Image: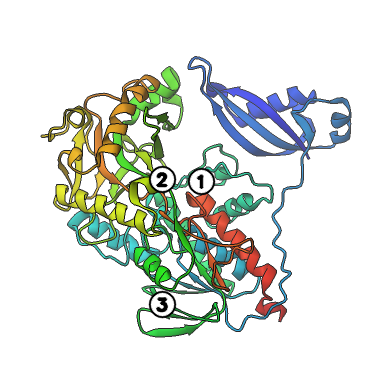
Amino acid sequence: MIRVRQIKIKVLEDSIQRLIEEVSKKLRISSSDISSYQIKKQSLDARKKDAIFYIYEVDIKTEKEKEILKRNHSKDIFKAPKEEYQLQKTGEKSLKNRPIIVGSGPAGLFCAYLLAEHGYYPLIIERGEKIEDRIKTVETFWKEGILNTESNVQFGEGGAGTFSDGKLNTLVKDAFFRGKKVFEIFVECGAPKEILYLQKPHIGTDLLRNVVRNMREKIKEMGGEFRYNTCLTDIKITDERVEEIEVNHQEKIPCDCLVLAIGHSARDTFQMLYKKKIQMENKPFAVGVRIMHPQKMIDESQYGKMSQYLPPASYKLTYQTEKGRGVYSFCMCPGGYVVNASSEKGHLAINGMSNHNRDSENANSALVVTIGPKDFGKDPLSGILYQKKLEEKAYQVGNGRIPIQLYKDFCENKTSVSPKTVIPIMKGQYIMSNLNEVLPSEIKEAIKEAMPVFGKKISGYDREDALLAAVESRTSSPVRIVRNERLVSSVEGIYPCGEGAGYAGGITTAAIDGVKVAEKIAQTYKSEETV
């Protein structure tokens, strides 16, 4: 196979036939000489609005491979490297009990998948419901305001990412092809094949639900077991090693290998771990609002007159205030919804969500401000308390509904009466409010300083009728559970994993961390099939 990079095709000319023609031209061969091809990457170059290109990287098979490689010396033409993920099972210790994975978000599911695939027969416990039941519970909450504190947007099979845009892009370098393995498993379980090569791949919450269900069934076929409505409530530690866990405050389960893929909102679990003196530390995160604009406005700003021919546009904005605060967009959802993502009674948190087609009329994004220990204290759990205070205030200001406000009124510190041109597209009840009553001064002032700058980068971003919603408080875990080079915590046999443990920041990075933990378990313990 030969890899060919930097194949540029104008958007209006994009087709497989045109791609093969351009590859042939670059290789100086006939199209008929190409027996097969595989797209490896597709990105979009929209720097010049009057000349927008797709840029491709393609692997092709041809009988003229040796001839082509001999006469070409371009850095964009070379022999395609072998890119294959391998999990090495070198562990020699025996497990008395099968591994237990707490949480079935991306980290837990991918850790379970790899372990099941290699004969470890993991037990996955999940405090929430399986995905089919969880969807019904969340829809009821959005319509009627009835919150299930154990199964909601944050808790349940699939994790918090199941009710999101399903973005899979990551900046993590993939030297060991873990990310490639993750994407391949996604596709095997029903995700669109194009996620294997798109620059900014996404699945969408509607398709992701089916993928999660299919992953569960494959794990079960390979010997894994799932238990829902099963919350980790205690851990028995003997001689600084895990010996047993307690679930639902009653049942005891023997355990010598425990993966904590608990997610960033399992505050009661963090409290229990802290009492058990498992080493933890707080970490910086970010809080703020969600901002809504017409998707058409974002498309035209990003793509100009070509916007009608392209998928809904995304954006990424960053700014540093005069006082050194970082302000940035996060988890941008083209054609999406703002959703009530609460998990505790008397507290309100929001998030963004899109279906695969990203076909709602609004774009929304978190607009958040960095905070650290100087804002919330040095105690390992102090960041959680900071989040809770914000969420409690948001709940009070909105009387249990999502508080929203026009940007102009936010700047003038007055309660909004009604939306204008930008119409709220939301999952969950909302009410016009004054977000200045929710946000601390350091957060709201940073947002107000950044918005005019963002308005210069994206035309109309700081329009008076843009809608803000509060509070976006769970951008990442405020806690890190310390682990060593073997990915083991201060208690032997416990593996902190994923976003909740402080080692990931999205679906793909959490899944990759789950793969890493599975590798370390396989390097330490023998599987049942090798015993």
| Residue lying at 12% horizontally and 35% vertically, measured from the top left | 415
Q: In which quarter of the image is residue 64?
A: top right
Answer with left or right where residue 521 lies relative to residue 296.
right
Q: Residue tagged by mark 2? A: 165
Q: How crowded is mark 3: few (under 14 residues within 10 Å), some or many (20 or more)?
A: many
| SS type, badge 3 | strand
> Which amino acid lies under the numbered mark 1 shown in the image of this protein?
Leu
Residue 96: percent from the left, percent from the top? Answer: 61, 84
Structural distance between the alpha carbons of marks 3 and 2: 33 Å
Q: Residues within 10 Å of mark 1 (few under 14, many from 20)?
A: many
Q: How many labels does the image show?
A: 3
Residue 461: percent from the left, percent from the top? Answer: 32, 25
Question: Relative to residue 221, is residue 13 depicted above or below?
Answer: above
In which quadrant of the rendered image does the N terminus lie?
A: top right
Question: Relative to residue 12, is residue 334 depicted above or below?
Answer: below
| SS type, badge 2 | loop
> Which amino acid lies under the numbered mark 3 shown in the image of this protein?
Asp
Answer with left or right where residue 487 lies relative to residue 299.
right
Q: Residue tagged by mark 3? A: 234
Residue 237: percent from the left, percent from the top? Answer: 50, 80
| Residue lying at 58% horizontally and 75% vertically, measured from the top left | 121
Q: Earlier in the sequence, mark 1 or mark 3?
A: 1
456, 332: nearer the viewer: 456
Q: Residue tagged by mark 1? A: 168
Structural distance between the alpha carbons of marks 1 and 2: 9 Å
